[in-house]
Image (cartoon, rainbow, N blue to C red):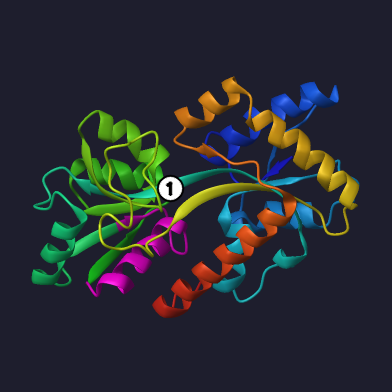
Amino acid sequence: MIVPFPGGGSNDTLCRIVGDKLAAAWNQPVIVDNRPGAGGNVGAEIAFHAEPDGHTLLCSPPGPLAINHNLYKSIPYDWSKFEPVTVLAIVPNVITARLDLPANSAQELIAYAKTNPGKLTFASQGNGSTSHLSAEMFIHMTGIDMVHVPYKGEGPALIDIVAGRVDIFIGNIAAALRFEKMHQVKFLGLAARSRSPVAPDVPDAAEIGLPDLIASAWFAIVAPPGTPAAIVQKVNADTAAALKLPDVRAKFLEQGAEPQGDSSAATAAFIKDEEARWRAVIKAAEVKLE
């Protein structure tokens, strides 16, 4: 199971939890192979060219499957040819602000930004990342003006939010939750259709007046092109069964991740919708990567 990002992050952790259960169900080892680089493109390329026999899978966040081909001039695989298996989990993005920002809700943030154009800063985990694009979506929907401060990962970005060096960060709730629980940052709104079970007091997108502000990190399993349907369905069924186990569900929720386990057809439709959503944001914000 190729994970196209380094060990220790949400992508790696969630895939390992499921991988352990699949190993038990199949009575054979499931090896998680971290192959980071180029925004996930390195690992995705390896999986794309693997034998389509069910022995190599890609466990990936949105970038390699729905975003990167819109950012880079070219990528070394065809994202649309992967065989979708299932969505493991969705981790909604949350508007996180420095504690002393003079705004205690999304509406107050918008009003403050409009009276102080170009003075607010937003952190991201890097150019073209979901946190960058989520903030661009927010800016486009509200008509505000903020300055982008890219970091190398969500950890450094959140540390500077805590330190008050940047104003907001629209990233996945799993990463920011421990800082919020320690009252080092504050949550102003969730970029999701419903409230999160891990932070039930945070209003959702509709409640903050932006029903189309839907932005999340999600993690899906896909197989190389040409993998037989029977194999795809077998992996889908066994993964869905693993996601229903109480201990797996509990571990996912500890990570701020909401378990899914969709059918392969539903997963294909989900990825298609996500690709269209992020393509529109990238085009509107004119984001490009070399």
Task: Residue 122: name its quadrant.
Answer: bottom left
- Place of residue 153 in the rendered image (x, y in percent of width and height, measured from the top left): 43, 48
Of residues 42 and 232, the one nearer the viewer is 232
Image quarter hosting the C terminus = bottom right
117 shown above or below 133: below
The local crowd at label 1, few if under 14, some if 14 to 19, many if 20 or more residues have their Cα within 10 Å, is many
Image quarter hosting the N terminus = top right
Residue with the mark numbered 1: 92
Of residues 66 and 74, the one nearer the viewer is 66
Which residue does the image show at 59% across and 34% down from the upper left?
A: 14
Which residue does the image show at 55% across and 28% down from the upper left?
A: 249
Magenta part of the chain: 123-144
28 shown above or below 61: above
Residue 12 visible from this viewpoint: yes
Q: Image check: 73 left or right of 19?
A: left
The amino acid beneath tag 1 is Pro
Of residues 245 and 275, the one nearer the viewer is 245
135 shown above or below 34: below
- Place of residue 188 in the rendered image (x, y in percent of width and height, measured from the top left): 23, 49
Q: Is residue 127 inside the magenta stretch?
A: yes
